[in-house]
Amino acid sequence: MSSPREIVTSALRFTFPARLPRDLWLLPVAAHLYPETVKYLQEKYPNDFTSPDYFYPPSAQALGNPYKKKGFIAMNGAANS
């Protein structure tokens, strides 16, 4: 059987993988309400995609609260109105 990497690569190259790559995306509430079912599905159908090990730090390009009137300063220094 092909590895997840081979399945994804084959699909991206349109060379007809043995099956379509899968990524079971669930809302957090599903794991909260149905933990046994979510665990079963994740074991039976593991994802072919993974998350990166790196996450971007908070940006210093914008400061403040964008949802508060005049509470957001953009990168160019313009405040929202």
Image: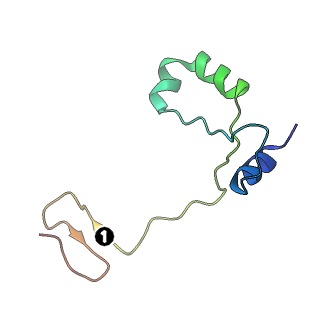
Residue extending furthest toward the front: 15
Residue extending furthest toward the right: 1
Q: Position of residue 19 (x, y in %)?
A: 74, 37
Q: Quadrant of the N terminus?
A: top right
Residue extending furthest toward the bottom: 76
Q: What element carries label 1?
A: strand
Query: Which one is in front, 36 or 68?
Result: 36
In the displayed structure, 53 sits above or below 70; it is above
Query: Which one is in front, 8 or 58?
Result: 8
Q: Where is residue 37 in the image (x, y as percent from the top left)?
A: 59, 17
Residue placed at 65% from the left, 56% from the top? 52
Query: Which one is in front, 38 or 63?
Result: 38
- Does residue 2 appear to the left or right of 59 in the view shown? right
Q: Where is residue 32 in the image (x, y as percent from the top left)?
A: 49, 23
Q: Where is residue 50 in the image (x, y as percent from the top left)?
A: 67, 48
Q: Residues within 10 Å of mark 1 (few under 14, many from 20)?
A: some
What amino acid is at disc 1?
A: Leu
Q: How is the image coloured?
A: rainbow
Query: Which one is in front, 76 or 13?
Result: 13
The image quarter containing residue 74 is: bottom left
The image quarter containing residue 77 is: bottom left
In the displayed structure, 63 sits above or below 1; it is below
- Does residue 49 appear to the left or right of 1 in the view shown? left
Q: Quadrant of the C terminus?
A: bottom left
In the displayed structure, 38 sits above or below 23; it is above
Residue placed at 67% from the left, 20% from the top? 40
Residue placed at 81% from the left, 49% from the top? 6
Quickly name the residue at label 1.
63
